[in-house]
């Protein structure tokens, strides 16, 4: 069904890496005489991940983007390939200028360097694993502030996050009937963390974030609420 977007002699760019799906896409492109380009990160070199930027080299040109995570190499490569098709004479300088202005609030967002506060809306096991893998790859060290909704698989998320730190603080998301209670989060956290601190409210959370190195995650509601407080 998704291949319905493939039109005759219109280039298609994908970042799909699933072999079964990619074969279907490839066959459809052949039927439609459509050029197929795959945004495969193996085409890039000198990939560098940090807590400030994601950088890589493609076709001999260095690119950087202020979004974090290895998946941003793939996303950026796809954008570059699109631009190469529709604006083939566009200077890479302008692509880099565009990349420099990109932001994605609450998604691996470093909102403060001193104290260090990293926000990420990871609220399911898949996203939590990607977050964990990235932070391990850049050598992140610190504490975790966590919350979750009742209907999320937060125990699996907590188990994954325990590979990052032995200390965690939990707080209930305020003014949300779907929010899991702080007591329940504390009880679950004790299964995987050596030290678990239960906070009563956002005021206590904000005080805790005033020093040290922190990762705030588990709920987009928590990230959004605390982001506003931090920025203000």
Image (tube, rainbow, N blue to C red):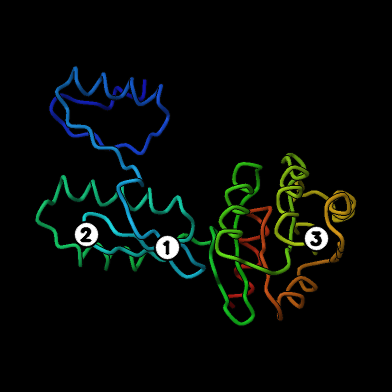
Q: Which residue is mark 2?
A: 60
Q: Secondary structure at mark 3?
A: strand
The tag earlier along the polypeptide, 2 or 3, is: 2
Label 3 vs 1, first from the N-terminus: 1
Q: Viewed as shown, does residue 194 lie left or right of 107?
A: right
Question: What residue would you read off at disc 1?
Answer: 48
Q: Residue at x 11, y 51 (%)?
A: 88
Instruction: Residue 168: give its label.
Output: none
Quarter in which the C terminus is drawn: bottom right
Q: Is residue 165 left or right of residue 117?
A: right
- The residue at the point 76 percent across, 68 percent down is 202
Which quadrant is home to the N terminus?
top left
Residue 100 in the image: state x and y as whole percent.
Answer: 34, 68
- How many marks can you see? 3
- The secondary structure type at the circle numbered 2 is loop
x then y, percent, for residue 115 = 64, 80
Q: CA distance from mark 1 to mark 2?
A: 15 Å
Q: Is residue 175 above or below residue 96?
A: above
**Label 1 crowd (10 A; few <14 / some 14-19 / many >=20):** some
Check disc 3: other Cα within 10 Å, few if <14, some if 14-19, many if 20+: many
Mark 2 and 3 residues: CB-CB less than 8 Å, in contact?
A: no
- The residue carrying mark 3 is 170
């Amino acid at each position: 069904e998704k291949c319905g977007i493939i039109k005759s002699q219109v280039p298609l760019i994908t970042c799909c890496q699933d072999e079964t799906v990619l074969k279907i896409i490839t066959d459809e492109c052949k039927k439609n005489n459509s050029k197929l380009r795959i945004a495969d990160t193996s085409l890039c070199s000198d990939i560098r991940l940090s807590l400030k930027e994601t950088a890589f080299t493609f076709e001999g040109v260095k690119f950087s983007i202020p979004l974090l995570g290895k998946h941003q190499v793939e996303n950026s490569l796809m954008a570059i390939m699109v631009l190469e098709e529709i604006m083939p004479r566009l200077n890479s300088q302008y692509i880099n200028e565009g990349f420099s202005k990109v932001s994605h609030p609450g998604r691996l967002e470093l909102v403060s360097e001193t104290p260090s506060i990293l926000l990420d809306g990871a609220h399911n096991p898949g996203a939590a694993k990607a977050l964990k893998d990235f932070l391990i790859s850049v050598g992140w060290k610190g504490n975790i502030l966590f919350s979750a909704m009742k209907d999320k698989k937060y125990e699996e998320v907590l188990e994954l996050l325990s590979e990052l730190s032995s200390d965690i603080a939990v707080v209930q998301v305020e003014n949300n009937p779907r929010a899991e209670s702080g007591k329940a989060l504390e009880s679950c956290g004790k299964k995987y963390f050596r030290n678990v601190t239960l906070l009563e409210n956002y005021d206590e959370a904000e005080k805790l974030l005033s020093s040290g190195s922190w990762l705030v995650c588990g709920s987009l509601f928590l990230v959004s609420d605390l982001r506003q407080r931090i920025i203000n």
